[in-house]
Amino acid sequence: MPLKMTDRNVGNVSVLELEGRIVLGEESSALRERVKSLLGQDRKQIVLNMANVSYIDSAGLGALVASFTSAKNQGAILKLANLGQKFREVLQVTKLFTVFDVYDNEQAAVASFPK
């Protein structure tokens, strides 16, 4: 199943809802491009809602790290919300949990940005 991405704004925060698999190839490239597009629109507060991500591989993790780095380099903040248990474990094992701001739900992630 290809990665579906839907973005919407909640106040000043861009929420990018992801659905499907973030894997090597088109999916991970598409994610990086979508985040770059949001940054190009001067969106500085981004939440990736991962509630419907069914699988992520190492290339998918790389795409998340690349997106996070691009955002940071442009003075933006990227946060993750609604991670499944397996995804949380992967982030802990890879020590990426210390890199990302992770929230239990989208509302908490959006509320964490300064007003």
Image (spheres, rainbow, N blue to C red):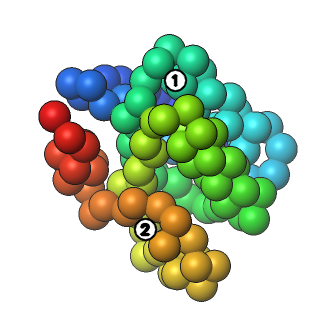
| Image spot of residue 79 (x, y percent) | 41, 50
| Image spot of residue 22 (x, y percent) | 66, 51
Is the residue under label 1 in contact with that under label 2 (CB below 8 Å)? no
Label 1 crowd bin: few (<14), some (14–19), many (20+), radius 10 Å: some
Image mark for residue 62: none
Foreground of the two, 44 or 60? 44
**Viewport quadrant of the N terminus:** top right
Taking the image as shown, residue 2 lies to the left or right of residue 93, namely right
Residue at the disc numbered 1: 38
**Viewport quadrant of the C terminus:** top left
- Residue 12, relative to residue 95: is it above or below? above
| Image spot of residue 99 (x, y percent) | 52, 65
Amino acid type, label 2: Gly
The local secondary structure at tag 2 comes to: loop
Quadrant hosting residue 25? top right
Which of the two discs, 2 and 1, labels the residue nearer the N terminus? 1
Taking the image as shown, residue 73 lies to the left or right of residue 57, namely left
Distance between the alpha carbons at the discs numbered 2 and 1: 25 Å
Foreground of the two, 71 or 32? 71
Residue at the disc numbered 2: 84
Taking the image as shown, residue 98 lies to the left or right of residue 22, namely left
The local secondary structure at tag 1 comes to: helix
Tell me if I can see residue 49 in this picture: yes
Which residue ends up furthest to the top in the rendered image? Answer: 41
Tell me if I can see residue 48 in this picture: no
Residue at the spot x=52%, y=23% of the render? Answer: 38
Which residue ends up furthest to the right in the rendered image? Answer: 25
Label 2 crowd bin: few (<14), some (14–19), many (20+), radius 10 Å: some
Residue at the spot x=27%, y=25% of the render? Answer: 12
